Amino acid sequence: MMNNEKQPKMTSGDQWLVLKRLLRYTLPHKKSITFAMILLLLTITGTIVSPLIIQSFIDNHLTLKSFDKNDVMLIAITYISIQVFIVIVSYFQTLRFQEIALKIIQQMRIDVFTKVQQLGLRYFDKTPAGSIVSRVTNDTEAIKEMFVSVIVTFLQAIFVIVGVYIALFSLNRKLALLSLVLLPLFLGIIVIYRRYSADFYQDIREKLSQLNAKIAESLSGMSMIQAFRQEQRLQTEFEDINEGHYKAGIRNIKFDSMLLSPAIDLMYAATLVFVLGYFGFMSLESSVEVGVLYAFTTLIARLFQPVQQVMQRLSIFQMAIISASRVFVLMDDSDMEPEQDVQSKTEITDGKIEFKNVTFSYDGMNDVLKNISFTANAGETVALVGHTGSGKSSIINLLMRFYEFEHGEILIDDISLKSYPKEQLRKKMGLVLQDPFLFYGDIESNIRLHDKEMSAEAVRHAAEFVLANEFIEQLPNRYAQTVTERGSTYSSGQRQLVAFARSIATNPKILVLDEATANIDTETEVGIQVSLEKMRKGRTTIAIAHRLSTIQDAELILVLHKGEIVERGNHQALIAQKGLYHKMYLLQNGILDDSAQ
């Protein structure tokens, strides 16, 4: 089942909650932020003082034609010094804010990745891998842009507005008072933009997530796509999603183009006309100081600059809020891996396994296991057989604690499976799947799984034990031979042998084999069976098998059908029953065809 990533539309209240949660990431950096804000305040003070210095020069020297050498030199040196000071302080202020932003996003990505590692398999069953990657990379990158530019711009705008109005009131109190009407206009545009742009940006992020999911699916299944000639279908589906992303982007661009820069530019032009008109009318009654006019118009321009920047970055802010909400949805997901109720330091000693009336459902509605009960005594092999969908893999999933179960009980050494520390279960239970996963690295690291306590000798012994050393020794770099992503350069049989070595290297008490010899050729399988007999000595083994010839020596064979155990016993007893197992045996040996069933 695939999650379509559709989230409810965000209200203004939702956006405010997301912003507050984002700002919590700034708490560990309070000292750095305070220092950066002081630098920002110094920079803004310099930019506001500069026009006042020019105003003083114009009114006190230029218009009066009073050019005292010392005074003029002092004004020039002061002005140039302030500009140099602004450049230097601005550099360190920008650098500090950038460092803080990168540290915040670094921590956020660690938090998201850690959360992903803790999620249960139920979450990955319903969520495309590409959408998860999109949240960890693209969405956090959008959040980074907010901390890098938007927050700084907002702070700068606040400081500039306060500073400019202080300067305006010092120049002309009446006109400064009239210009306060600009503030509610600025705020109104911001509120309108945030209200209507949220839907656009949420649509864009969802389409981008779908794009990533489609790309990830295509790359992981490329061999199947080419084998079954699905290239055109996948291309058409990708084009449809891409077209949706394009249309969502165009809608947002049209909205931005209508509301942001044009609205602010229009307000600036109207304000400038009003200021010039005001001074024009004043000049009819009394003289107007040219320096004051220059300073007032310059400060008005300085007032609109940060507001213009805020408007331009509102799109980044809105994108970041939507992205953050998607990240937090992942971080708040309750589909966690099953928790253990560890009462004490419990250890697996014998490996006895017992299922008691276990019933399980993946979706909470349809039971895939119904009242499963059996016992695997220490050192015994229990084989699970049955047609596809009978519930074999579900039993292993529960035993490995991949999924939580509500009905029944699973015991290991007469102690509840839920009472063991997760580390103990992983250490004492060896798992080999039908399609083993190899990590990028080399052969040795894939066997030891980066266990620093495991010696190179132990790695080689494990490989020899399962006969993997025969092909490893023939590789150019032997155990240091590179393993590409998923081990794609190795045959299925070779990957399976490495998985066998990986499992036996930890010396587990319980072996879980999910059709472990399915991808190994007959000649190699004969050798593997010898190794498996040695591996099973002193270990409890739960094995799923489709080839009945591989489990004829099992102490107990469970035949499953539609989630229930319909037959149980050893090979000879089940053959004698002439039931489902007997029919499967005859079919595999070519004695019975499908129509005879």
Image: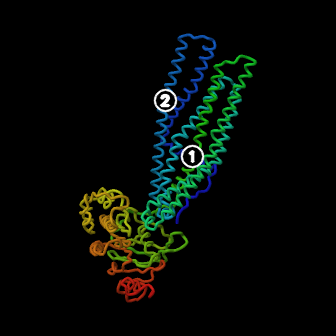
Q: Nearer the viewer, residue 278 or 53?
A: 278
Q: Position of residue 364 (x, y in %)?
A: 54, 70
Q: Nearer the viewer, residue 302 or 593?
A: 593
Instruction: Identify the image quadrant of the C terminus.
Output: bottom left
Q: Position of residue 109 (x, y in %)?
A: 46, 50
Which of the two labelled residues, at mark 2 and mark 1, occupies the earlier sequence position?
1
Residue wearing tag 2 = 89
The answer to whether residue 165 is left or right of residue 429 is right
Q: Is residue 574 above or below residue 11?
A: below
The answer to whether residue 262 is left or right of residue 411 is right
| Colour pattern of the rendering | rainbow
Residues under labels 2 and 1: Cα distance? Answer: 29 Å
Select label 2 or label 1 by which is in front. Answer: 2
Q: Residue at x 51, y 21 (%)?
A: 80
Q: Position of residue 310 (x, y in %)?
A: 59, 38
Density class for disc 1 (Cα within 10 Å; few <14, some 14-19, many ≥20) is: few
Q: Nearer the viewer, residue 410 or 125?
A: 125
Is residue 307 visible to us here? yes
Residue wearing tag 1 = 20
The answer to whether residue 574 is left or right of residue 198 is left
